[in-house]
Image (cartoon, grey):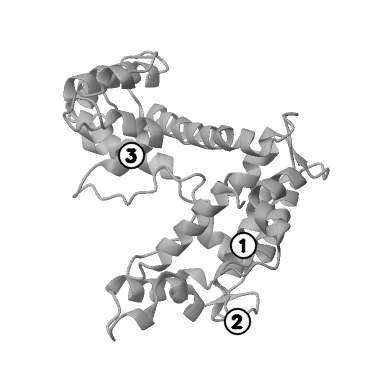
């Protein structure tokens, strides 16, 4: 059978292709703080996931306002590392980054046992291949809409890039780099290569303006008038993406696009939370200021059902 992890990815791709009106982005900023759009005019869901981590945010969604505030009060004490009674922007940024790292760690732990078939504390390429592409390897002649041969080749290339000692056996750190390559400096080349291969329709090894826009917007599914953001992206490509003005993005330009090193999502989110909550504008937060904005930090659906089941030991 094909590995459930791979099937989830394929279903995601398939469902995504059925919504051509939605804007798609390939920009990586380490592991995303949230998969949601940051739209504070509609809700604070992005902020909840960025501050708590994606799984913990689900827990808080089931709590009453009183319980949310009680738990948030405990979290505030943890964030205040220097115990001065205030939360600085730096402390808030560090907390958000740790939530981000926790999500990556849990993702790897969740998948580790599925692939470490012999329980030796490592995952060989053959183990990963057999779990992920088992049914295809058993019968490669089976008709399918997916090119598993190409997908397996790309996976092996990424696996080899993550495998620092070249033994085709991944320890926990190497497997993390395989699953989350955007977090590792030595994996940038393969992330860029995969991105170009996904978008480069004419196979010349570059991304031209037509391919760049086509990856985000399928014009044939719409009328004559493009959304305003498409025009903005065309301008972005010409003015910022295509730095040497040759009409296409090479590997270096693609790297600058998808893995920018001049923007820190955790820092931006910390600044945002501070700005929204700092009532006296002194550049730091008291516990009272955070609790007064508890809906921004953790939210609540005002429900008490299941509260006892959801309570963690640390609370």
Q: Is residue 161 left or right of residue 302?
A: right
What is the number of the mark on residue 194?
Answer: 1
Query: Mark 2: few, some, or many residues within 10 Å (few <14, many ≥20)?
Result: few
183 and 111: which is toward the camera: 111
Callout 3: helix, strand or loop?
helix
User: Could you tell me if residue 53 is visible in this image?
Assistant: no
Q: Residue at x 69, y 64 (%)?
A: 149
What is the number of the mark on residue 14?
Answer: none
Q: Which residue is mark 2?
A: 202
Depicted 22 relative to depicted 222: above or below: above
Q: Which dot, 3 or 2, sits closer to the camera?
A: 2
- Where is residue 4 drawn, in percent x and y? 55, 47
What is the distance, in whole Å, between disc 2 and disc 1 at their CAs?
A: 15 Å
47 and 274: which is toward the camera: 47
What is the distance, in whole Å, between disc 3 and disc 2 at their CAs?
A: 42 Å
Q: Which residue is mark 3?
A: 271
119 and 26: which is toward the camera: 119
Q: Is residue 65 left or right of residue 180?
A: left
């Amino acid at each position: 059978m094909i590995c459930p992890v791979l099937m989830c990815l394929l279903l995601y791709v398939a469902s995504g292709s059925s919504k051509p009106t939605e804007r798609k982005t390939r920009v990586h900023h380490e592991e995303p703080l949230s998969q949601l759009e940051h739209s504070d005019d509609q809700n604070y869901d992005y902020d909840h996931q960025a501050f708590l981590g994606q799984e913990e945010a689900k827990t808080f969604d089931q709590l009453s306002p009183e319980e949310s505030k009680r738990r948030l009060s405990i979290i505030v004490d943890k964030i205040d590392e220097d115990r001065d009674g205030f939360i600085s922007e730096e402390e808030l940024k560090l907390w958000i980054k740790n939530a981000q790292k926790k999500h990556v760690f849990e993702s790897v732990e969740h998948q580790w046992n599925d692939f470490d078939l012999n329980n030796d504390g490592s995952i060989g390429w053959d183990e990963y291949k057999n779990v992920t592409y088992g049914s295809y390897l058993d019968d490669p002649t089976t008709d399918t809409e997916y090119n598993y041969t190409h997908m397996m080749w790309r996976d092996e290339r990424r696996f080899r890039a993550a495998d620092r000692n070249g033994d085709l056996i991944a320890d926990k750190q190497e497997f993390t780099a395989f699953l989350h390559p955007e977090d590792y400096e030595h994996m940038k080349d393969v992330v860029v290569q995969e991105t170009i291969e996904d978008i480069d329709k004419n196979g010349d090894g570059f991304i031209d303006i037509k391919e760049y826009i086509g990856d985000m917007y399928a014009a044939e599914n719409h009328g004559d008038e493009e959304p305003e953001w498409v025009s903005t992206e065309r301008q972005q490509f010409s003015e910022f993406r295509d730095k040497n003005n040759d009409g296409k993005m090479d590997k270096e330009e693609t790297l600058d696009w998808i893995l920018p090193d001049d923007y820190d999502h955790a820092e931006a989110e910390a600044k945002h939370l501070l700005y929204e909550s700092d009532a006296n504008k002194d550049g730091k937060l008291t516990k009272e200021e955070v609790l007064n904005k508890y809906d921004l930090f953790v939210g609540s659906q005002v429900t008490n059902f299941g509260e006892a089941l959801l309570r963690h030991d640390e609370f």
